[in-house]
Amino acid sequence: MIESFGTERLLFRPLSVDDIDELLLLDSDPEVMRYINGGRPSRRDEVDEIVQKSLGHRWMAFDRSTKEFVGWFALRPTGDREYELGYRLHRVAWGKGLATEGSGALVTRAFTDLGADRIWAQTMTVNAASRRVLERCGLRYVRTFHLEWPEQIEGTELGDVEYELLRSEWRH
């Protein structure tokens, strides 16, 4: 488990059960949730369940200068020395490079502190902003695939994309 750490503009601390209200507020923005579920706010029981499953591999991120909560970042173990990268930011934090900064820091920590051999992520094909973040963090496009989603979201017909970065490709 990676404890608290920081980057140039962000401070990270491990997720706790006390963070549900902050996460509910984040998930109440329809634009934040657009590529997750079409813009529907998360319910408290959904957030509580996710928090319980995410303890130990998700971090709350705060603006270093203002101490304001900007979002979360995750490295979820998915196999032997393999981790899924994820993040979600408040809209006010978009377009400032914070997703790339935070994700890049977790990629580095995954390889240096956790001994990862592979980091991967997926997003909707139409989510160009997230795709750019993944590419800026060194992940490369692997494939497009189609899943059956319980909720149809505009763009689901184009599928999802997977990106990855292998230890052998990672630049220290």
Image (cartoon, helix red, strand yellow):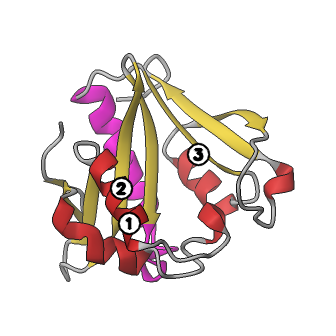
Q: Which mark is residue 45?
A: 1
- The residue where tag 2 is placed is 49
Judged by depth in the image, the label closer to the viewer, 3 or 1, is 1
Above or below: residue 118 compared with residue 147? above
Report the quarter where the N terminus lies: top left
Dot placed on the residue nearer the N-terminal end, 3 or 1: 1
Q: CA distance from mark 3 to mark 1?
A: 33 Å
Residue at (32, 62) in percent of width and height = 48
Q: Residues within 10 Å of mark 3 (few under 14, many from 20)?
A: some
- The residue where tag 3 is placed is 135
Q: Magenta segment range?
A: 89-113
Relative to the observer, which residue lies in front, 99 or 122?
Answer: 122
Report the quarter where the C terminus lies: top left
Is residue 9 in sight in this rendering?
Answer: no
Which SS does the magenta portion mostly show? helix
* Secondary structure of the residue carrying numbered label 3: helix
Residue at (28, 51) in percent of width and height = 52
Residue 29 among magenta residues: no
Is residue 67 in sight in this rendering?
Answer: yes
Q: Say whether residue 107 is left or right of residue 17.
A: right
Residue at (33, 44) in percent of width and height = 106
Q: Quadrant of residue 7?
A: bottom left
